Image (spheres, rainbow, N blue to C red):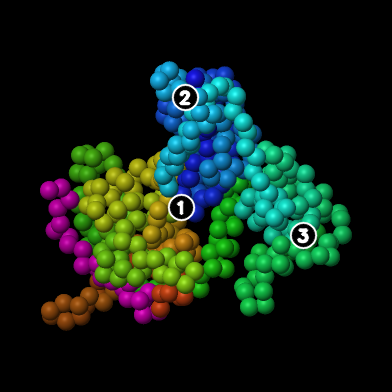
Amino acid sequence: MALVELVMPRMGESVMEGTILHWLKQTGDKINADENIVEVATDKVDTEVPSPFTGVIHRILAEKGQVIPVGQAIALIETEQSATESTSTPIVVTEKAPSIQPASYISLSVESKTLPVTKAEPTSGQKFFSPLVLNIARQENISLSELDGIHGSGKDGRVTKNDILAFVEKRKSSPTPTEPTLQQKESTPESTPGYVSKPSSSVQGNIEIIEMDRMRKMIADRMLESKRISAHVTSFVEADVTNIVYWRNRWKNDFMEREQAALTFTPIFIEAVVKAIKDYPMVNISIEEDKIIVKKDINIGMAVALPNGNLIVPVIKHADQLNIVGLTKKVNDLAKRARHNKLTADDVSGGTYTISNVGSFGNLMGTPIINQPQCGILALGAVVKKPAVIETSQGDTIGIRHMMFLSHSYDHRVIDGSLGGMFVRRVADYLEGFDVNRKIFV
C-alpha cells in the first residue's frame, strides 16, 4: 500500500491559489484515475479537478471554502502497489507538476498507512497569509498586528477568507487602528495609490441591496488592478465590412448544413487580428518589471458574456495555425462551454491578446480594459448600415455600406500611439480587403 498526496494544481500562469468549492468524493470512497474528485475555484475559472491516481480516499485535508496555495496537499489517496515497488524507505518523493495542467501532484511512497503531516513554517516569526487574505486586508485597512492576531480556522491555524471577512464585520463598530495598515506600509509618495476603503454611506429610499457574487468581486478587483497597472490609451478606426457581410450571407447556410455550426463574424475578425499581429508583433507582448516579453505564440482571448451577466475570457491557442473553419469551430465550442460553466483551467490561460465583441450588445464602440498581463485589447463594434463614399474608377459615389468601429486599448508604457494606431488600422485594412469570392471549403 502507498499513500499519495493530491495537491492544489496550477490552473493558469498567474494563479497562485484556489478555493475548495465542493468535494465530489468523500473519505473512504473509491476513486479511479482521471475521475473528478473536487471542484476548485480560482480567479479565472471554476473547474473540476480529476484524480491522477486510482485508489481510496484516505483523508481529506482541505475543507470546503478553504483557500489553498498551489502545490499544497488537499487530500491523501491510498493506492495499490506491488511488493517490489514497496521499500523500507519512509518517504520517496517524485515530483510531477507541469506549469499548467488539469491536475498536478506529488507522489509519496510510504512504508505504512501513517503519513506525517508537514506544517508550514512561519517566516521571520510571522504567520503565512494567502494573497487573497492580504488583498482583503489592504482594501479594509487592516493593520499588520490586527491581521496577525486573527484566529485562523484553516489548516495549521491559517487565516482563511471567511476568517478575515468575519473580522471585518466585527471591526466595523471598533475605532480605526492608529498604527500603519498594510496599504499604508506598502504605499510610497511616488507610487500609484491602490485600493482605497471608502466610509460607509447611509442608504435611503426604495432600494435593493445585492451582494456581489465571488466572480463579480474578482472581476471588480481585476479591472481596478488593470487600470492601476497599465496606462490605458484607446485608438478608434471605422472599417467597411460590406464584403464580409455578403460573403457570410452566401456561406452561412452551407456551413450550418455541413459543419452543424453557426458561421459568425467573430472568427473572421479574429483572423484579421492574427494577421495584424504578425505584421506588428510588438503588440503581442507583456511586461515583467523593466523587461518586455514578446510572445511568439498568438493566443487570442475572446470575452464571453455569461447568463448571469459576468464575463469570462476563454483562449484560442495558436490561432495563427487555424483556418476559418477551425476558428469557427473553436469559437463556437469555447462560447458554448463558457455559458454552461464547462471550461477548464487550460481554456482560460495563456492568452496573449484579447478581443471583446461589444457589437453583440448593439454598441457602436467601447473603451475596453486590458486583460492583464497582456498589453492590448480590441473592442469590435456593431455592424450597421450607413451611407458612405465609394471610390470607383468613374469617380466617387454615395452608397449604403456595412460599417463598424474598432476600438484598440493598449498599454502606453510600451505601445506608443503610432504603433497602437497602425495596428488597429491594419486590422481594418484586412477586413476591408476581404475577398468576397473566397471559398470556405477547400
Q: What's the distance in space between the residues labelled 2 and 3, CA to CA? A: 50 Å
Which element is circle 3 on? loop
Which residue is nearer to you in this view: 236 or 126? 126
Which residue is nearer to you in this view: 177 or 415? 177
Q: Is residue 117 visible?
A: yes
Q: Position of residue 335 (x, y in %)?
A: 39, 45
Which element is circle 2 on? loop
Q: Are marks 2 and 3 in contact (CB under 8 Å)?
A: no
Q: What's the distance in space between the residues labelled 1 and 2, CA to CA? A: 36 Å
**Residue highlighted by disc 2:** 87
Q: What's the distance in space between the residues labelled 1 and 3, CA to CA? A: 30 Å
Q: Which residues are magenta?
A: 417-442
Q: Are marks 1 and 3 in contact (CB under 8 Å)?
A: no
Specify which label sits upstream in the sequence, 1 or 2.
1
Q: Which mark is residue 163?
A: none
| Residue drawn at point x = 46 percent, y = 52 percent | 13
How packed mark 1 is, by other alpha carbons closer than 10 Å (few <14, some 14-19, many 20 or more), is few
The residue sitting at the bottom extreme is: 395
Label 2 is placed on what type of residue?
Thr
Magenta stretch secondary structure, dominant: helix
